[in-house]
Amino acid sequence: MARDAPKVENFSMPVVRRDRGVLALVIFVVLFAQVLLYPGVTDLVATLGATTQLDASTWFLAAEFVGFVLFAGVWGVLSDRTGRRVPFIVVGALGGAAGYLALASLGPRHYVGFETLLILRFLQGASTIGAFSLAMTMLMDLEGGHGRNMGAAGIAIGLGTALGAPLGGLLYERGTIVPLWVAGGALLLAGVLATRLVDRAPSEGRPGPREVVQRLRTTPALGFPYAFGFVDRLTAGFFALVGTVYFRDTFSLDAAGAGIMLGLFFGPFALLQYPLGVLSDRVGRKIPVTLGSLCYGAAVVAVYLAPTLWLAGGAMVLLGVFGALVSPATMALVSDLASDANRGVAMGGFNVFGNLGFLAGFVVGSVVTGSFGYGAAFLTAGLLEAGIVVVTLPAFLRLDLTQSPTFSE
C-alpha cells in the first residue's frame, strides 16, 4: 500500500515543500469530491429515491458528517498509537471512493432503498475523514511554521470547495449522478497521491487511548480552537444546504448558478488562506481569529439582506475574505497546543468539533428555515459566528500561547 521509508529526523526544505504540496493536494481532492454534490443535492436525493427535498437533503448530507464525527478521533488515535499516517490515509481515501461509486451504481437503479443508501453515505464519510484529518495531521508534522503549514491546508480546502461548487453545478447539467462518479474517481486519485508520502509521525512516546483522553482533559486551552472551529464549520454547513436552496429559490438559479454563488465565497477563501496563515505566524492567532469572526458573522447576515443577486455575490466574496482570516489561524492554534506525539488525536478532536458544527449547520439551518423562514436562519448563523467570540473573548485574550499548557509532559 504505502511504501515504508526510514524515519529521518531532519528534512531539507525542498523535501518539506514537496511533501507540503502533496499533502495539500490530498486535502484538495477530498474536499473537491465532497463539495461537488452540494449545488444540486436536492435533485440528487430525488434521483436516489427520496420523496422530499430539503428534509432528504438534510439526512443525506448529515449521514456523511455523522461518519466524520464518530470516526475522526478514531483515525487520530490509531495513527498516534501506531506511529503511522500514510497507510490510514490511503485506506481512508480508497474506502471513501468505494462509497461514492457504490452510491452512483446502486442509487439511480433503486437496487436498494434510500435508507440503505444513507448507511452507505455514513460509511463513505467514516472512511473519507481518515484521509482528510490525517493529511492535515501530517502537515502539522512538517517543519516551516504552523501558520504556513495550516495555510497550505486552508488553501487546499478553499480551492477544493471553490472549484467543487461551480464544477459540481456544471456536472449536474450533464447528469444528476455524474458528480458521484467524479467524486469517486477523485478520491481514488487521492489514495494514489498518498502513497508517495513519507511518514514523519513521531515514533517514540506514543500514548495509549486512556492517556490521550487524559491529556486532552488537562489541556483546556484546546477548547478555544475547537469552539471556533465548530461555529466556522456551522456556517459552512449552513451555506452548503440552506444557502444553496436560498439562492435557487430567491434568485431563480439552477444548480450551475448556485454553484457559482458558492464559488464566490470559496474563491477568496482559498486564495487568501496561505498568506493569511503566514500572517498569523507573524502577528499571532488572536487578532485574526477575533476580528475575522466578528466580520464573518456580519457578512453572513449581509448575504441575506442583499436585495440583488450582484450584491449577494459581493457579500459572498467578503464572506470568503473574512473566513480566510479565521481558518488558518484557528487550525494553527491546534498545532501550537499539541505536542508531537499527540497531533493526530488533537487534530482529530478539532475535526470532530468542526464536523459537529457542519452537521449543526444542516440541522439548525433546515429547522429554523422551515419554522421561521430564511431571514431568521441567516440571522441565527451570523449571531452564532460572532457570538462565540464575544462570549469567549475575555478568556481568549488572557491566554498566553507562549506559556499555554500543552500535551507535553
Image (spheres, rainbow, N blue to C red):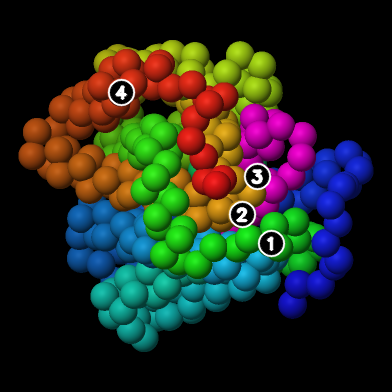
- Decide: marks 1, 2 in contact (CB < 8 A)? yes
Horizontal arrangement in the rendering, residue 233 relative to residue 160 (left or right): left
* Residue under the image location 23 percent in, 40 percent down: 365
* Residue under the image location 77 percent in, 67 percent down: 195
Q: CA distance from mark 2 to mark 3?
A: 11 Å
Q: Secondary structure at mark 2?
A: helix
Q: Nearer the viewer, residue 212 or 255?
A: 212
Tell me the amino acid under the disc marked 3: Met
Magenta region, mostly helix, strand or loop?
A: helix
Residue identified by numbered label 2: 341
Q: Secondary structure at mark 3?
A: helix
| Residue 288 drawn at (x, y percent) | 51, 18
Range of residues picked out in magenta = 130-154
Q: Secondary structure at mark 4?
A: helix
Number of marks present in the image shown: 4
Residue identified by numbered label 4: 392
Q: Is residue 313 visible in the rendered structure shown here?
A: no
Q: Determine which of the numbered discs, if any, sits on residue 140 in the image.
A: 3
- Decide: marks 3, 4 in contact (CB < 8 A)? no
Q: CA distance from mark 3 to mark 4?
A: 25 Å
Q: Quadrant of residue 300?
A: top left
Residue identified by numbered label 1: 204
Q: Quadrant of residue 241?
A: top left
Mark 1 or mark 4, which has the lower sequence index?
1
Q: CA distance from mark 2 to mark 4?
A: 28 Å
Q: Is residue 406 above or below residue 392?
A: below
Q: State yes or no: residue 325 in magenta.
A: no
Tell me the amino acid under the disc marked 2: Ala
Mark 1 or mark 2, which has the lower sequence index?
1
Q: Quadrant of residue 1?
A: bottom right
Q: Is residue 281 visible in the rendered structure shown here?
A: yes
